[in-house]
Structures are given as structure tokens and as C-alpha cells.
Image (tube, rainbow, N blue to C red):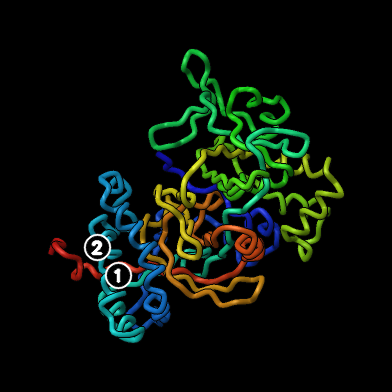
Amino acid sequence: MRTFALAAALALALWSAACTTPDYGRPLPPGAPALIALKHDEKRPDFGEGFKHRDELALALDRSIEWFKKESSKQHFPMEQITHERAQASVIRFRELLFEARDAGDFTRRVNNEFQVYKSAGWNAKGGGVLFTGYCTPIFDGSRTPDDTFRYPLYALPPDLAKAKDGEILGRRAADGSVAGPYPTRREIEASALLEGKGLELVYLKDPLDAFIAHVNGSAFIKTPGGEELKFGYSGKNGREYSSLGKELIRAKELKSKDMSLQGIRTWGRNNPEKLAEYMARNDSYVFFLEIDGNPRGSLNVEVQGERTIATDKALFPRGGLVFVETKTKGADQTFKQFLLDQDTGGAIRTAGRADLYLGVGPDAEQRAGHVMSEGQMYYLFLRPDEVPHAAP
């Protein structure tokens, strides 16, 4: 069972080097809440978008509803004083309202009457805002067997990677079963050919940067020369810290912030293959994969859905919950105001001031994800306590 999130967002890898003020990576002060209830007279977003796209939103809601039915989901509550009972009832009732309401206006009124709205504490612990980036499932060319064209493998989870029951990476397991120390870094894995020849190779790609991007996103779909489509999702990682390729390139003045994009990195990498290998090796994090059916799964072990799944810090925010996001997608300068479900974990997110938007599969999603770095706000919606069925008085 896959209980971990997709890896850190592609957009974060490409754009996090940009200087931003305020500091969206700032941790919350000890004891500070991650969610702040909106005051009675505080303006709420226009929730009519949910009604207008109720069919696709219902699909994402159904996945959260199914997750809440599992006994294992209860271990993650209460979170931010939200009980499991309240969180579960909230997604169920919201789905009912999508199809009970007469129109978008009626839907918005009923949501506002029945739901309490909270905003993220954001970068300053006072609701100051959130920085959104994007991630996706890229599609690359590849082959199950290596040759002169396809030489860069994606690996399955190695048997000597020790994990705790909750999925925490413990390190590298020795032959006697003990944990001998931390699992090797990306540089150590690649320099020593640690994983080669052990039957762990799942698929081979033709570009080392493609393999790196697959690691960053935590999933990839692969088209083979014979026309087969292979799908790979996140299986685990080596437990080492993630660092941004884009940040390293800008810091070294190899690329300018204004030129930072996926295409910019690809062009630079083709002209500087040895340097590219060195800068990618500076990211200690290394991701392992498994072959999947359907879409990749997030940290709730449910399929992610384009523009309906959000990844956050699960040490701060309640899993499975309904989130309304207000931001812009930077590339097209498009307003982004819609509901998503908190069904994934951002691999490089350790703050209330950051979140990742899953934007789907393929080249268009990859292009959009590489250009999203936008400020905004996210709101969580939970039924008012007196609206929760069987709630204690």
C-alpha cells in the first residue's frame, strides 16, 4: 500500500530560487495554529465555482469520502481541533449540496450557512498568504530494456531501504537486519552504481534530466518505441533532504532568474551535460517508483486529479479536507479560483505558507506546472459543529 506523497513539485525545483518577500518558507511559531477561522464580518470567496463544475469536483470528493471510511484515517485526527467525525461529515455534506442546490447562488448561500471557513495561517502565522507552485505527471519516451538511446533507469524501492510502520525512512538495513546508517545520497547512489544489476530497473529513459524531473514530480508516464504506455508512481525515497536544481543554477550564475524555466534548463543542460550532472547530484533526495494502473496516488493512497488535488504539509493541515484556492497561474496570468481536496503531501513543503497544485498529465500540465509560482490564499471548509450529524452537544 502506498502511503507517501508524490515528490516535490517540478515548479518548486525550477522556481524556488527566485527571491520572494515575504518569506513563505518560514515555519509557524511553536503552538501557532495553521488554520484561522474567518470572522463573521470577514469577506468570503465566491464558492459558486464548485456548483458550476460539480461533476468533476464530485469525483475528487468521492475519493476523500472513501478514505474517511477507512479505520486507518482516524489516526490522523484531531488536527487543528477538527475531529475525524467533523471532517468526514463535511465532505459528505458538501457533495450533497452540489446536487441539491438550484444554482450557483443557492449553492453559495447554503455553503456559507452550513460551513465554517478557515484560512491558512500563511507565511506570517496571521493569514498573510500562501505561495503556490505546481506539479504534474510528465510523459517521456522510454523503454523497458536499455540500449544506446535509453540508458537512464527509474528504480524500484530497494530491499535494504528501512522504513518504519508509519513510512518514516530509517536508513539502510544491514545484512543482519539492523539499520546501519542513513541511506546513501543521490550522488553516492549514482557514483557507486549502488542499484545496478539488482533487478530494480523498471524502465529506461533517454535523458538524465527526464529521470530527474520524474523524481521531482514523483510520477511519470512513459511511451515506448512499440507504442506501449507505462505508468509509474511514487514508492518511496532515500530519506535525504530535497534541494532545488533551479536554485543551485541561479546561485552559481549559470542561469538568471528571469530565464528560469523547464525549457531554459533543458537548453542549458544540452550545452553543459557534465555540469548538469554535477548540479543534479547536489540534490541528495532520490525517489523510487512502482508500476501503477490509473493515475498516480497521493499520500492518502487515492488517485490525484488534475486541478482538484492539492499537496500541503500534513503535519499542519487536516487530510482529505475541502480547500478553496485563490491565486493565479503565472504563465498565462490566469485567475485560479476553485475547490481542491487536500489529498497529497508536498515533499519540500514544511510550512503553512506553501502549497502545490496538481495540474494533471502530459506536456501542457508540465508546461503550466513549470510556470506556477503565485501568491494567494487557501481556505478550508468544515461544517459548523452544530451541523455535524450526531455531534456531541
Task: Name the side, left or right, on which 347 lies relative to 107.
Answer: right
The quarter in which the C terminus is drawn is bottom left
Residue positioned 52% across, 24% down in the render: 160
As drawn, the label of residue 389 is: none
Does residue 349 appear anywhere in the picture? yes
Q: Is residue 7 above or below residue 169?
A: below
Residue at disc 1, secondary structure: helix
Contact? badges 1 and 2 (CB < 8 Å): no
Which residue type carries mark 2? Ala
Residue 45's spot in the image, x, y percent?
Answer: 42, 79
Nearer to the camera, 120 or 373: 373
Q: Is residue 283 above or below residue 309?
A: above
Q: Is residue 19 above or below residue 279?
A: below
The residue indicated by pointer 2 is: 89
Which residue type carries mark 1? Phe
Where is residue 152, by image quadrant?
top right
Answer with mark 1 or mark 2, whichever residue precedes in sequence.
2
Residue at disc 2, secondary structure: helix
The quarter in which the N terminus is drawn is top left
Nearer to the camera, 384 or 221: 221
Residue 328's spot in the image, x, y percent?
Answer: 58, 73
Residue 133's spot in the image, x, y percent?
Answer: 58, 62
Task: Name the side, left or right, on which 110 lies relative to 186.
Answer: left
Does residue 354 appear anywhere in the picture? no
The residue indicated by pointer 1 is: 94
Q: Is residue 60 above or below residue 179?
A: below
Residue 240's spot in the image, x, y percent?
Answer: 59, 37
Residue lying farthest top?
A: 176
Residue positioned 47% across, 18% down in the render: 178
Neighbor class of circle 2 (other Cα within 10 Å; few <14, some 14-19, many 20+) is many
Neighbor class of circle 1 (other Cα within 10 Å; few <14, some 14-19, many 20+) is many
